[in-house]
Amino acid sequence: MDELDLRIVHALQVSPRAPWSLVASVIGADRATVMRRWRRMEEAGAAWITCYPVLSPEHTFTLVELSCIPGRTLQVAARLAADPHAVSVMACSGSSDLEVDVITRDHRNQARYVLERLAAIEGIRKVRTHQAAAYHHEASRWRLGLLDAAAEGRLAAHASPPAMIGQKATNDPGTAITEAQRDIVGALASAPRMPTAELAARLGVSRATAHRRLTELLSAQPVMRCELAQSLTPWPVTATFFLRCPADKIDVTAQALSRLRNVRAVLATVGHRNLCFAAWVPSISHVVRMESQLVTRMPHVQVTERSFVTRPVKLMGQLLDEDGWRTGTVPIDVRRNPLELI
């Protein structure tokens, strides 16, 4: 991927459904070239757009750490990657072998997934869960950094800038999401840039109605994000840090972490390790450097665990090869009963 490819990706990070004419104008290329290059990247699995379900107040987000029987880690990862609740699966270093992001319909189904679904998978030796209390920053807000503020502003104006999940707790009722809007997410899961006319036909509504519902949906929560293979970026290593932070400083610490260039996600959790964040860094040595800078700038924070991804398996419903290139999709479906997977 050259710089023009990366500028296209950055533009779609800001506005995943931006018209090709706008993308071309912003990055300084012609429309046909932009379309051709995106199609090439998408077909190769180098870059893609993910459309994922809207989070409701009753939904639960859990970070699960798994220790596996030696030699069984990849088999367990493959089983989990096929689950619609395991939205992301990463093999990692550190005290656990796998890190899995799990989204379920409610706390009852969360318990079913952790206590029964995981128990039915051979090769898992130990399970440790971290219940999300608030999502302060999420990866749909992360940018490559190749476009200036004016270019991002033009794209954001088209996108109808959403009220990001990262600005509020995951259990904050926020804006009510209608069933009609959930139908839009389902329709766009396989083709996030589906033309509005085609979307309207699939939903059986007028084009104006489809456009209005989609605009309202994107203004309520981020349901799309543009990703690219991490190995194609200057930051090929994903590092995860678990922190212990005084309760009265969680919010201000999370806000400070969210402003760091390489940080893609910041999550407050319930337990003695009450803050977690993930970052893309240039090398493994930068994991140590980042931790050193963190404790220097935030002496009230204690780093209790750190790890890095040794092999990506699945990211927000997208199956990945060992270099992080997209190979397929397992749609996220929080409505499924985890016991059906046993």
Image (tube, rainbow, N blue to C red):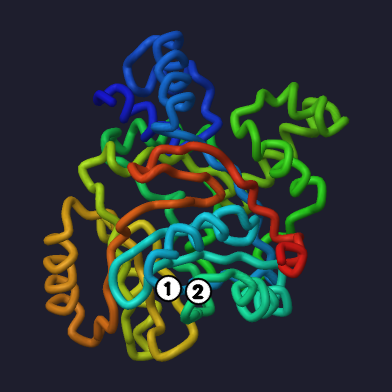
Identify residue for label 1.
Answer: 69
Q: Residues within 10 Å of mark 2 (few under 14, many from 20)?
A: some
Q: Are marks 2 and 1 in contact (CB under 8 Å)?
A: yes
Residue 204, image x, y percentages: 87, 30
Residue 119, image x, y percentages: 61, 77
- The residue sitting at 19% across, 73% down in the picture is 294
Residue 101, image x, y percentages: 51, 64
- Towards the viewer: 309 or 150: 309
What amino acid is at disc 2?
Ile
Say the numbered circle drawn on residue 124: 2
Say the numbered circle drawn on residue 260: none
- In the figure, residue 297 lies in which quadrant? bottom left
- The residue sitting at 66% across, 72% down in the picture is 117
Q: Residue furthest front?
A: 71
User: Where 316 sits versus 106, above or below?
Assistant: above
- The residue sitting at 69% across, 44% down in the picture is 185
Q: In what quadrant of the picture does the N terminus appear?
A: top left
